[in-house]
Amino acid sequence: MSVEHNVTKVLLEWINSFSLGKTLRAPEELTDGIILWEILQDIDPQYFLDEIPERNPENHWVAKWQNLKHVHKLLLSYIRHQNDDSLPSGLDPSPDLEAIAEKASSKETNKLLKLLLIAAISSPNAETYVQTLQGLTTSTQEGLKDIIEEAHNGQHEPMHAADELREDLAKRDHPVDLELQFEERVGKVLAENDRLSHEKKELEKALEDLHNRLARLQENNDTLQNRLASTEDRLVTLKSGKGDLGFNAKALESKTRQQDDLIASQEAKLTAAQDEVDSLRMNVESLKVKNQRYQKLQDDYDELRTDRDQLARKANAAEKYRQKLQASQDFEKENQTLKNQIKDLQQQLKESDSQQRWTSEHDVELEEYRKLLPRIEQECNEIQNLKKQLEFNNHALTERLESADEQHERDDALISELRERLRELEGLPGSPSPGSETP
């Protein structure tokens, strides 16, 4: 017991050499896995990229257990990756994570911290951690050295089969039944699955609404194009001189103002369409996040299946051991219960596969809508160009109208002047009589 206490003290002093923002006093502060995950991200931030499953476990041992399983899984994978797909022979690769989360077992915590120490000295920044070790106390350095040598040169002895059976029986005598724990975990997975299904239905409904709004915007855009084409034809007709030029300047200004208002309203609709496109993109990103969460749920389900298989193997071993002590009827009932649970889990797996296929089809539809976005942007650019052309034609027609008005005023003045001169010529003496020939 004293040896384990010394090992715990050495490992805690090494853990406190990291920049954690606080000083750890006892191994109970590591049971939630959050500090361990921060240390792993400091060891190799390129490998440990994702987030820990439960950021706020709220002192519930099941949530802590989920975090520890996530940390332990990636920790073993990292050590194998750095050591040519092998583990040091003196390490215990399977600490009792449930005992750490529920009872804060110092012995099992030391096993997990030893794995963390081997990962640190196997990382690309191993020289930095070795220099940090040299700054610790002499006793801590010697303790860490012994742990590292034992991990690389020792031989981990697995638990004997009889000891494992005795441990299984002790766990069966424990007030917390393993079957109840398993049912609790399965219930949580089912609840999470139902919640994700509900969220997918809501997203599907929201996406259908967005599709309807996009169709309405497309119809408005087609109407705008038809009106612009009609206006262009009328302008071409007016330029060619074949149109009706009997309207006055006020009527032309009124129509021009109406066209400007129409163009402004269509621009507002195009802006709204762009906002809808942005909203669709955000929904696509949200669906990607939901898909990642669904993948996490699938990983948890695989872990539950592994735990179920382990429980099944332990139940079979216990059944062989207890056949000498009591009848096998209770074990047959337990096996039947496990079979029913396996059938339920298989049914849930089939439902999860169908949901995965539905998600793939949904991704294909989203990809088709994403291909439509460049065409809409191109049509918006064409509308902008048509607007500029209409403004230019409007300006040219206005200048022509002003020029025609000025020419009309000059012609009226010239006609008035000629009439004055004619009257003056008729009033002069010796002018020819009205009946005489004009010279």
Image: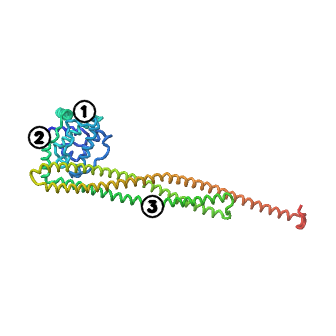
Q: Which residue is mark 3?
A: 212
Q: Earlier in the sequence, mark 1 or mark 3?
A: 1
Q: Give the number of the disc on residue 420.
A: none
The amino acid type of the residue labelled 1 equals: Val
Note whether 28 is above or below 279 in the view shown: above
Residue bearing mark 2: 1
For label 1, the SS is helix
Residue at 64 percent of width and 55 percent of height: 396
**Residue type beneath disc 2:** Met
Mark 3 is on which residue type? Asn
Residue at the bottom extreme, as displayed: 435
Residue 286 visible in rendering: no
| Closer to us: 203 or 135 | 203
Is residue 126 toward the left or the right of residue 228 in the image?
left
Tag 1 residue: 130
Image quadrant assignment for residue 399: bottom right
Q: Residues within 10 Å of mark 1 (few under 14, many from 20)?
A: few
Crowd band around label 3 with a 10 angstrom C-alpha radius: few (<14), some (14–19), many (20+): few
In the image: residue 300, left or right of residue 141: right
